[in-house]
Image (tube, helix red, strand yellow):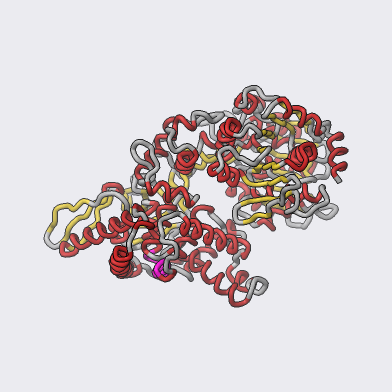
Amino acid sequence: MLEKFKSSFNRNVMTREEITSKLETSRVAVIVGAAGCGKSTRVPAAILRYCGVGTTAIVSEPRRVAAIGLAQRVADELGENVGETVGYQVRLQSKPPRPPAGAILFCTSGVLLRRLQFNPGLEGCTHVIIDEAHERDVNTDITLLLLKRALKINPKLKIVVMSATLDIEVFTRYFEDCPLIEVPGRTFPVEDFYLDDVEKQFNIKLKNTRENCTKEDGKPLINCQEVVEVIKAVDNTKTEGAILVFLPGWAEIKKSKELLDQIYNDGTHLILPVHSRLSTADQTKMFNKPPPGVRKIVLSTNIAETSVTIPDVVHVIDTGAHKENRVKQGTGTASLETVWVSKAGSKQRAGRAGRVQPGFCYKLYTKEKEAELTAHTTPEILRIPLDQTVLDCKTYAPEEKVEDFLSQLPQPPSKDSLRFAVNDLIDLGALSKTEQLTRLGVLVSHLNISPRLARGVLHSAIVGNVVAAGNMVAHCSDNVEVFANAADRKDEIRNIKRKFSLTSDHAALHWIQDSFELKLEEVGWREVDGWCDMYGLRKDRLSYVKSLSNLHLEHLLKCGMLEKNPEVEDLNRYSNIDEMTSAILLSGSNTILFTKKMVKTKGKLKTAVELFTSLGERAHIGGESINYGITKRKHNTNLLTYFGGYHSTERRALVVHKTTLISPLTALLFSMGDVQKKASVEDTTDLYLPRHRLTIEVPTSQADHILRLREMLWNSFEYYIERNVNGIDFEEFTKTSTFKNTLMKTVASVLVEANSEYVEKYIKETDFR
């Protein structure tokens, strides 16, 4: 069976001798080849064949689907089942190989990083292959740094970096001019047409598209009507074959599809949107060949740029724009922006048309604009918030300064973005001012989720609502979409969630998950479909959330904060109290939105209610949220908590998709930072939260009690986080547990009563129409 590999290698001018001979003289090699040249499957097999039974190779992939799929393909070509010579390991799923007959393990970059954390030299491993290195995600860059160190620890280790034909010098320089093996691709020629050519060839004028190329702010703005004009022109005048259209985001895909549906309504065209928000089943439709006489038109984001190959694409229409996560200057928060693609990205897009036959690429920008594009896509580490990365770095190199450690990356991040991340972790309590991991930082690092969510999970174990917190964190950390075709069902989804909670997306998703698991237990996997269909839910995603939540709880139990066999009842006593779940979210995220009356001076002078963050940034709640349209409700003062979100340059606001209404008392008790007692006026006292620039008026008779309750709550959090659980005697354990149970019972009662008085009381049926 291995002879099959050899003949395939000869066809690709990439023999195993080329690879192995380079690795004989150098411990690192870079292999470069276009998508489809076979390097992902052929290279691991070549190393296995040459090195034999002593081989223990790890192949790192950026996506779990690729790791599982490639393991299956290599095993098939070896005539074996996965789990023999070849295996895989991704989060929540693994089928490892069985040594000692030589082994190849395909895994995600996150799994490899965890291995490097506990085994810095990768002792016992002979080869590490980094696939798709050109994508330059954070995990890949950090992995390269740690592998460079591992070479010094493990003299037997060899490294292969595999990349598409993009920015190869970064890797060869990083590994000190290591040898380069070039693999020719198997693509057909693609003819490029720029904007001038497109207008002339099809006799159309694209005014807005042309203006786009010379905009002063340099940010592309896509005119969907003009994109559709080009699609029509290609369809009317060009040969058969699928048309692939690259658009920046879902809004443009949806608008273009609506326009095309009006034009092509006779069954002669198959119009398929491709976006990460769609179900796997919907996305896989793009691979199917349509019936004779039917033209397939695929509207896609850059997911189709490198991740997938649609075999029958002949025509590519490239708008030249894509969405990119960046750090908003001045705040360090994530910002999702529409920007021009790089020259390398443009080349990748054009190449999608030449997979199986000669193709054509219609670029909706000028040749002059293309010359202005950056050469390569900016590495992820240079354009995202780094709090998680910084915390991870402290687990890899606890004694090094973060800046010193990350300066060893191929392209280090800016000092400003590092400063934001370090300061945020100091504020959270995970790092000391000298950048040492605190006790909280050590616990948080074991949970492998966002540091702020991790702190909330730790608090949930102290309070006693770990199941609700686990479900909430699974949704917040991975942004799992459990609703089918969610992008087109925002109103419906909002109303479905309101059947489970009137005030909280987080609570609603927890109760949906809880109901699914109860139904699953009652009727089984096959019969649960009816319940899922009733709400338009995806059982595969709900099952994934269940596994993810269980994983978070497993990490919590093993992190070292809790005793060996804690009482399940104590851990989950308050999971049925939604007010406690929202309070736990706030205790970690420390994020609040509030509505505020404003006087609008544009147009007719009037008073309007708008939504703001604690820092004064405007905010917008997504259409699928229970609290969408909250600024139009008659009760004008509302507080909400949330996690994540991104700054939208189009809206000039923070966009948040999951929110929870909270009472003023929840904010007073569970937000981090100081609470200042202001002067009393008659029978009321102002309590001020400086961190949130928020003043809350309370009865003077209750002010001191609230502050005392808050003090006891946060002292309890600190005690349980800082304690040495193995050094506590029975008397202290019993005494503190009794006090904690009494305290949490009081807190729960206060939260429920406050929610009834300040939140539920003001919710009207008309709010949801």
Query: Residue lying farthest bottom?
Result: 522
Q: Position of residue 422 (x, y in %)?
A: 40, 38
Q: Residue at x 46, y 57 (%)?
A: 556
- Res 661 seen here: no
The magenta region covers 570-580
Residue 342 on the magenta span: no
Determine which quarter of the picture holds residue 339.
top right
Residue closer to the observer: 142 or 670 = 142
Query: Residue lying farthest top?
Result: 177
Question: Could you tell whether 112 is left or right of 619 in the image?
Answer: right
Residue closer to the observer: 343 or 76 = 76
Q: Position of residue 16 (x, y in %)?
A: 80, 34
Q: Is residue 750 above or below residue 184?
A: below
Q: Is residue 557 above or below residue 77?
A: below
Q: Position of residue 75 (x, y in %)?
A: 78, 50
Determine which quarter of the picture holds residue 224.
top right
Residue closer to the observer: 355 or 177 = 177
Residue 574 on the magenta span: yes
Q: Is residue 69 above or below residue 366?
A: below
Q: Position of residue 188 (x, y in %)?
A: 82, 34
Q: Residue at x 63, y 48 (%)?
A: 253
Q: Residue at x 77, y 28 (%)?
A: 21
Q: Residue at x 75, y 49 (%)?
A: 85
Question: How many numbered discs sit on the rendered protein?
Answer: 0
- Res 698 seen here: yes
